[in-house]
Amino acid sequence: MVYTQKSSALFIIGVIMLAIWYLADSGLMSPYIEHLAYGKKYKYLSELTTIPLYFGIVAAVIGLWQMLGKHQPGSWDYYSSTIAGGMFILLIAMLVRWFVAPEVAVVSMNMGKIGDTGKYLHKLLGLNYIVLGIVIGIIIVNVFKVPLWAENGVRLSRLGLKSGVILLGTLYSAAELVNLGGLSIIMIGFFVLGSVGMVLWMGARRKIPNSMAGVLSAGLGVCGVSATVAAAPVVQAKSVEIAYTIGTILLWGVGCMFIFPIIGNLLDMSYVQFGAWAGTGILNSAQVAGAALAYQPDGIETLKVAEIFNITRVLVLPIIVLWLAVWYVEREESVTEKVNVGRVIFEKFPVFVLGFILLFALSTTGIFAPPQHYKGKYFGNTADKGYKESNLLKAETKALLLAEAPKVQRDDRKAALQRLIDNGKIMSVSDDDAIRGLINAKVMSKKVNKVLKKAHKSVRHTAKKVKAFRQWITWLFAFGLVGLGMQITLGSMKQAGGQPAIIGGVVGFTKASLSLLVVMLLISETI
Amino acid sequence: MTSVENVLLASHGTEGSIAAAHMAVRMCNKGAKLHHLVVVPTLWKGMTGDDWLNNGSTRNTFRRYLEGQLGREIDEHCKEISEDAEQHSLHYTREIVVGEPEACLLSSCNNSNYDMVIMGSPRPKGKSGIRSRMPTEPLARSLSIPLLIVPYPNE
């Protein structure tokens, strides 16, 4: 069978990308870019004048070959058939990131701030390029259908997300990984075991079949659809039970992806708090990444926290599947097959986590940034280390900080703030950490926080390789999530119902609200 | 009751469609042809769409399991109807296709000269089962042969 479609689609995608590049590079798009920038600096200009050029050439050349060339069955044909769909997702991600999301922001800012929240609608609802990308993906698959020539490539989105997680390994410091890992093991351990137990208990009370209770407990307890897929064969779930479970999880997951950032914004949660909450409370792992990037689209601190929780969940998955297998065999007399522990662990082990660990290990050797750099960032408050004297605080800014200094409670933060006021710049790494903590704590006014952020940014410089990784990670997640959106069908979400919907509602709500409480009470602003 | 010689039965194992199957068997004359169309809805294709954490092996295991499970459920359903049809001396044939139920039914109708299409009525609210409802009004408009919708069985 020949998989590569003889279609002009990929060539047209390439031409569209090249047209975007030409319009941006030649300045013909400048008035529109000014409109999107809304009086600020348009932050995607460097991307606009490079990325569509490179990918446009690749798409146009391969597109021409796919359209005019002869294709033979084989491995190369299969890989070639994925390019059009991959480029299709990429084009959507580009359009949403560069044009759609900024346009939504302009419309939202023109509407003014919403009531007492002091926030614009798009900020409050988290309507950024990630969320809009997923929504557009969902619209494409459900309204227009994914074109035949793009079907194979759309599945590449999984590869994008896994590659994103693997690359994320370069951005953790050892201390951060230890702290976040410890926290996630406690939180995930408690909530996963708690929700699996709760589903099994509720299932017994409501007299649902063991197969349904088993598949539902994995899906609701561990990591959503992925856990359902892993557990269904083990507990011999019926087709309708699988449909109910996946439908319930998808509906909850997509709902949570929109609702969580709104709640996070209303509660002014720190990035660590939100990442931990999303990583624990959202049933489906795909929507965890979506919600984290929705909450903080232009930074990856939230994503870093949320993904550690996701990784912990997926590492727990083989254990839970094993538990359910033993649990099911004990309860079903008809099942005589013994559980092969080694096989279950081996088959369900998420290999991509090894890639994450490998890149983390490599980054600790200093291959990407010198070891003394913290998370690829280094401190420099002198001209020879990249500090610009123009960033020194002015007298009126110092007065502003002084006026709000009494709001600070912690001694280390008080001292760091005082030294910033005295010297006009942050004086040491520990002072910078304290100032960062102060920013995340959100105890100061927005105006002061803006000054503190600027002071922090002027002394923290990112290593070039790490900066490139960050950009790649953002794009990989954007690509992956748009593609995943294209695989979320209303047909599968419509299956939510029956006992799984009732149990899912109770367990999902309990998990989300309890984890919010724990996060707000026990987790500090920084790790 | 009208007797028919060549019937298309659209049924996929729900209580409503089992009632339709029984009705179809009883309506046919001895020696009549009963063609059983089972449609596996395309919504199953979207069931693993959101899964990105698993490796290919787990996903393949799931796909094989799901195919097997759907196959077993369809086989059981077909066996029941086939036995019933045999008892009434009917020529039973079956066709299993993946697609949108309405399109598959119309396509099957166009490929043969059936006297009638028989199907079950939609599941009442609150009844468990896959949500893949076929809109009967546009279907009735598109068919050139009689369509019999058998009432849902009383509890």
Image (tube, coloured by chain):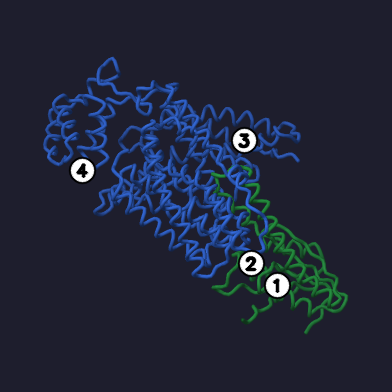
Chain colours: A blue, B green
Q: CA distance from mark 3 to mark 1?
A: 43 Å
Mark seen at residue B134: 2
Q: Are marks 1 and 2 on the same chain?
A: yes
How crowded is the residue under tag 2: few (<14 C-alpha within 10 Å), some, or many (20+)?
A: some
Residue at left offset 64%, top offset 68%: B138
Q: Quarter of the image containing the C terminus of chain A?
A: top left
Residue A437 percent location from the top left of the image = 26, 37
Could you tell me which chain the residue with mark 1 belongs to? B
Whole-percent x, y for residue A500 in the image: 51, 63
User: Which label is found at residue A460?
Assistant: none
Across and down, in percent, residue A260 comes to: 38, 52
Instruction: Give, as a three-letter code, the residue at label 3.
Output: Ile
- Mark-to-mark CA distance, 1 and 2: 10 Å
Chain identity of mark 2: B
Look at mark 3 in the image and give the residue it sits on: A83
Q: In the rendered structure, which disc, 4 or 3, sits on the residue that comes first in sequence?
A: 3
Residue linked to disc 1? B119
Q: Quadrant of residue B144?
A: bottom right
Q: Amino acid at mark 1?
A: Met
Q: Are marks 1 and 2 in contact (CB under 8 Å)?
A: yes
Circle 4 or circle 3, nearest the eye: 4
Q: Chain of mark 3?
A: A
Q: Which residue is mark 4?
A: A443
Image position of B1 (left or right of A375): right
Seen at 59% across and 65% down, the residue is B131
Q: Are marks 3 and 1 in contact (CB under 8 Å)?
A: no
